[in-house]
Amino acid sequence: MVICNADFMASSKQSGGGMKAWIVHGLLLGAAAVTGACAAFYRRRHCGFRTRVVGIIPARYASTRFEGKPLVHILGKPMIQLQTHEWLSLNLRWMNQHLMRNTLQRTWERAKLASTLDHIVVATDDQRIAECCRGFGADVIMTSESCLNGTERCNEALQKLGKNYDIVVNIQGDEPLIEPEIIDGVVQALQTSKDAVFSTAVTSLKPEDGADTNRVKCVVDNRGYAIYFSRGLIPFNKSGKPNPKFPYFLHLGIQSYDSKFLKIYPNLPPTPLQLEEDLEQLKVLENGYKMKVIKVDHDAHGVDSPEDVKKIEALMRERNLS
């Protein structure tokens, strides 16, 4: 709509061409306003799906991943090789706590950079972790020791938060180099895939990680939905050797869930493939739910064993994050 004042109308009588120019200009402005309003309505209509998002970092103290490992360096601090089981157990407990403290804080700091998260909390069953996290400013939700995996811990934390969220992002506490863009990517994948209840990310698998059972592999269909996850190399060809030309995928630990599905997940019975592979994602697929997968360029992975610490430290130094 064009609004004209008296002075303008008077002067326009003296200049018919000027009047026509202003009318055309006004029409163009009106068309632009209508177009903008339509675009805004479209965004509200399509981006209003699953808009409220919480990031949860599940962390447990009773990890067995480092059990029996005699030597590890954590952020440049060496641990000597120990001979007796008693001292080994004692120092491994200290080592695990020390590593958790650093990786958790770095993970939390990286997660805070994600633009899609409305809130971030750490969910743990251990007071030592809770005190450490509160010390660097994180909100903490105490959860039960009976949680079987990170997904169940996220569900319990969601219930205790007592707020309505549409998406819950499970951010692994041992991913100190997670890119905020990956967090945003899995959230947006779930927001734009209404038939999926779960989303996650994969990156290219390095040849040296093909036989590592701590590196979970994934195969995806041509629409970007997960087909299967395995600790073994998949697909596995009849030659019995990895194909250097095939784009194998490494599963990254980050995953997001529709909050309604997350409440259902703990009540789903364990499935044969889930139990055989010890992978919680397979319970989702075996029960017929869809999982959206995004492919990202990510050159780091979580701390799954003491050997990973040096790799993480090297990457931190390269990026001046140490």
Image: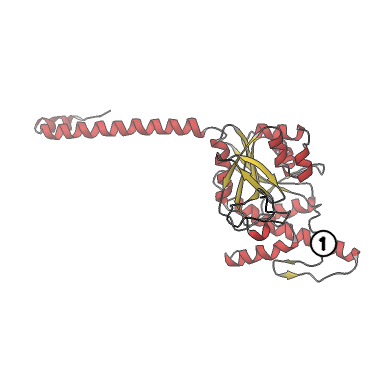
Residue 71 spot, x, y in % from top left: 79, 67
Residue for point 65% across, 48% down = 235
> Which is nearer the eye, 204 or 113?
204
- Please determine whether, in this image, residue 135 is positioned above or below residue 194: below
> Which is nearer the eye, 234 or 140?
234
> Which is nearer the eye, 175 or 157?
175
> Which is nearer the eye, 121 or 172?
172
Quadrant in the picture for the N terminus: top left
Residue 260 spot, x, y in % from top left: 66, 31
Residue for point 78% across, 69% down = 79
Instruction: Give the colour scheme of this rendering.
Output: secondary structure
Residue 68: name its quadrant.
Answer: bottom right
In the picture as drawn, the residue positioned furthest to the front comes out as 239
Quadrant in the picture for the C terminus: bottom right
Report the side of 292 relative to 268 (left or right). left
Report the side of 294 relative to 24 (left or right). right
Alpha-carbon neighbours of circle 1 within 10 Å: few (<14), some, or many (≥20)? many
Can residue 94 be seen from the camera position used here?
yes
Label 1 element class: helix
Report the side of 221 relative to 100 (left or right). left
Residue 146: name its quadrant.
Answer: top right
Residue 299 spot, x, y in % from top left: 59, 58
Q: Which residue is mark 1?
A: 92
Can residue 171 be seen from the camera position used here?
no
- Type of residue at label 1? Leu
Residue 240: name its quadrant.
Answer: bottom right
